[in-house]
Image (tube, grey):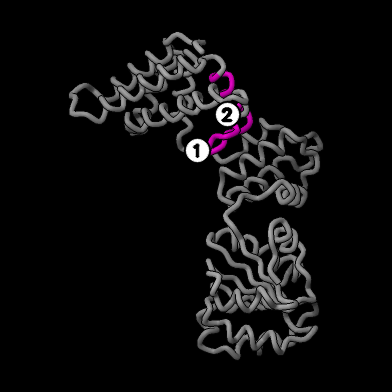
Amino acid sequence: MLLKGAEIARYLARPDPTRPALLIHGQDAMRVALKRAEAVAALTGPDAEAEMRLTRLAGSDLRKDGATLMDEIKAVGFFPGPRVVLVEEATDAVAPAVAAALGEWAHGDAVIVVTAGALTKSSALRKLFEPHKTAICAPIYDDPPGEEEIARWLAEAGLRAVPPAAMRDLTTLARALDPGDFRQTVEKIGLYKFGDDTPLTPDEIAALAPATVEADVDELIDAAAEGRSDALGPLMRRIETQGIAPVTICIAALRHVRALHLAASDPGGVQAGLGRLRPPVFGPRRDRMARQAQGWGGRALEDAIHLLIETDLTLRSSSRAPAMAVMERALIRLAMMPRGRR
């Protein structure tokens, strides 16, 4: 049986223990691993590894000795409770062994969970699981988790009071982070809010989200975009000591100004334009960029883009001018440019 859409996440959160087998496959190994861990934990309950109710088999080993799978699903454990036999990194070579085990599976046997990478439509494993009447096939796509899945993770982390603004920022953050990093961020937020019944705020999410290595560069560019020319010198000295190249600063500034121009030019307004950015921005950062875009206006931002393009060409040319000084001068000019032209 092939699962589709939202039913994939719902099923893997609460898999049916009366079904004999589950195939989880996808291009992203981290996403597959997270879903596999979630499904196995739901099937076996706590302490499965310690109580030897979870047996792991490598796909490469099973290819050499297919009878191992049959032996493991029929084995009787020392501890009571549901059992799972996990076949990891499976390929089509293990399909005959899995098919034989499915044919002999009976209620009370261990549930078979198979994980695999990307499988084509002609894959023997997919052809085995997708048309099967009781086994389940769950393809994992590279889509970010939806609001329903995020809400479930928040509940598991003990977070109940999540207002719409906070959920919006969490959904945006889920699109920006790898699934493993996002799940860890949710757990960190849960620990931070432990014993705190007040609603989760966007500021708290921003403070707990993974910090980027470009944080100082972002602060520098914000100073230029907000006309704070007096702050540029100290920030430039700090960045210079970190060994960040002037071209890197210029590229980041150009990316930022283009994002502001996109937001300022959007027919639906600045907020709609910011919502189209990739990677997305959220929380206080989004509000700050909205104020910058509104303060500049479209025409002024076009002039800023031209200035930064000229600076980038100078930095990449054979000019003998000190590169960091060229970049600092460009940012000072940016900070002092007239704003508000539409």
Circle on res. 265: none
User: Which one is in front, 39 or 144?
Assistant: 144
In terms of secondary structure, what is the magenta stretch mainly? helix
Query: Whole-Å distance between the Cαs marked 1 and 2?
Result: 23 Å
- Judge the density around disc 2: few (<14), some (14-19), many (≥20) Cα neighbours within 10 Å: many
| Three-letter code, disc 2 | Gly
- Residue 310 visible in the shown view: yes
State which region is magenta. 275-293
| Three-letter code, disc 1 | Thr
The residue carrying mark 2 is: 273
* 313 w.r.t. 122: above or below: above
- Residue 58 placement (x, y as % from top left): 55, 78
**Viewer-nearest of labels 1 and 2?**
2
The residue drawn where x is 66% and y is 73% is: 130
Q: Secondary structure at mark 2?
A: helix
* 230 w.r.t. 111: above or below: above
The residue drawn where x is 75% and y is 35% is: 164
- Residue 225 placement (x, y as % from top left): 47, 18
Circle on res. 212: 1
The residue drawn where x is 68% and y is 48% is: 146
